[in-house]
Amino acid sequence: MLPSSRHWLRIPKTYKAAVYDKPGQISIKLEELPTPEPGPGEVLVRITHSGVCHSDLSVMRSGWTGLPPCPVGQIGGHEGVGIVQKLGPDCEATSVKLGDRVGIKWAAAFCGKCAACKAGFDGHCETKKFSGFFTPGTFAEYTLAPANYVTPIPANLSSTLAAPMLCAGLTSYSALLKSGTSSGDFVVVSGAGGGLGHLAIQIGARGMGYRMIGIDDASKRSLVLECGAEHFLNMRDFNDTTLAEEIMKLTGGQGAKAVIVCAGSNRAYAQALPMLGFGGTMVCVGIPEGEQVPISNATPGALFAMQKRIVGSSVGSQKEAIEVLNLASMGIVKTVCREEKMDALQGVFEEMSKGAAIGRVVLDLS
Ligand SMILES: [Zn+2]
Ligand SMILES: [Zn+2]
């Protein structure tokens, strides 16, 4: 059957979704829900793949202090790739067509008018609509998305490899852009073997020409070196003082130009500042769960004498998402991942909560 102007294929009346039925705990329930109709400016996307991010686990467990608890029945997920299946009214002004392969990110929508949007930070739009947190996410066969904010997926990139770029890849890339570094500079990544860290190492080493140093547990050594790190440090071989001393040694006494803290650990934050050389930047990315504590040694004196900076970075803009997907389509960054079906999600989260997951899990929802 040829596609009509507004939809193609048969769209089922209901679709399968994985919902958080007991927020606060790791508990997933598969439900059949009525397929929604796209409203003005919206498209219905048949999701074929969704990455599983550590933030999904934090949202489900209501692990982030300062944010409202997750609602019962929330559909999680914010690294979705799928096919535009139906256009709502008023989508003509956008470039999205039926059958397009598109991505859905943590920032579910943008307004184009707020201070963040005007500054090019549409991923931080004040509308605060987040996929998988109060807005239905991508652990489902279908979802709605604004036609003007879905991300085009390069034709030669598989959906499995595209999905993790929409949060993990975007977050890693944006953090490196905010690090104030130039090619040839030393950049340290703590948590270098994790979902974000191993992408930051690849993008930094192969996409941006940085000299990357990875810090993580000994079990991640070969992964981090294969990703392009020049050096790997096993965090258990050092205390906080000797770790910074080792970085000074590896960088010929100058210190790192940037430290990207991907590990969601207060200790990793406390270790980062002494590793920086003159004018160095610490980029805060990983979010420690539980009570938020200040970065322990960030005294004014520790910053001004050496002109150090501390910056925060989370997700990124639509422009950055398109750029990092292009890096992936060129083979510069490739996520270590494995595929699972939707009914395996409970086990995947349990594995993640024990820190046992190696690389990213991508759900195959097709
Ligand atoms: Zn994420
Ligand atoms: Zn906005």
Image (tube, rainbow, N blue to C red):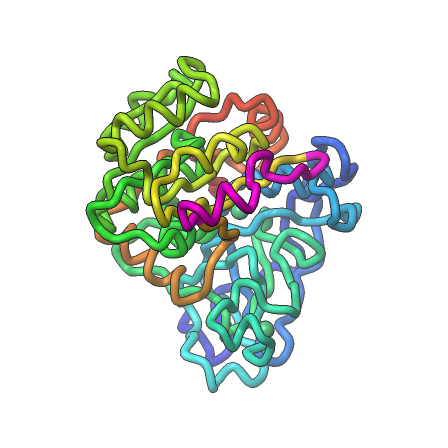
Residue at image coords 55%, 51%: 78
Is 193 situated left or right of 301 in this image? Answer: left
For the N terminus, give its image quadrant.
bottom left
297 falls in the magenta region: yes
Horizontal and vertical percent for residue 35?
66, 61
158 falls in the magenta region: no
Question: Magenta part mainly helix, strand or loop?
Answer: loop
Residue at image coords 49%, 26%: 357
Indicate the quadrant where residue 88 lies.
Answer: bottom right
**Is residue 344 among what the camera can see?**
no
* On screen, residue 151 above or below 162: below
Towards the viewer: 86 or 122 = 122
Horizontal and vertical percent for residue 4?
46, 78
Residue at image coords 27%, 40%: 186
Horizontal and vertical percent for residue 24?
77, 35
* On screen, residue 191 above or below 5: above
* On screen, residue 343 above or below 219: below
Q: Quadrant of ligand 2?
A: bottom right
**Is residue 292 among what the camera can see?**
yes
Is 106 situated left or right of 22 in this image? Answer: left
Horizontal and vertical percent for residue 114?
60, 76
Is 30 situated left or right of 78 in this image? Answer: right
| Magenta-colored span | 290-308
Towards the viewer: 295 or 233 = 295
Residue at image coords 69%, 36%: 28
Callout count: 0
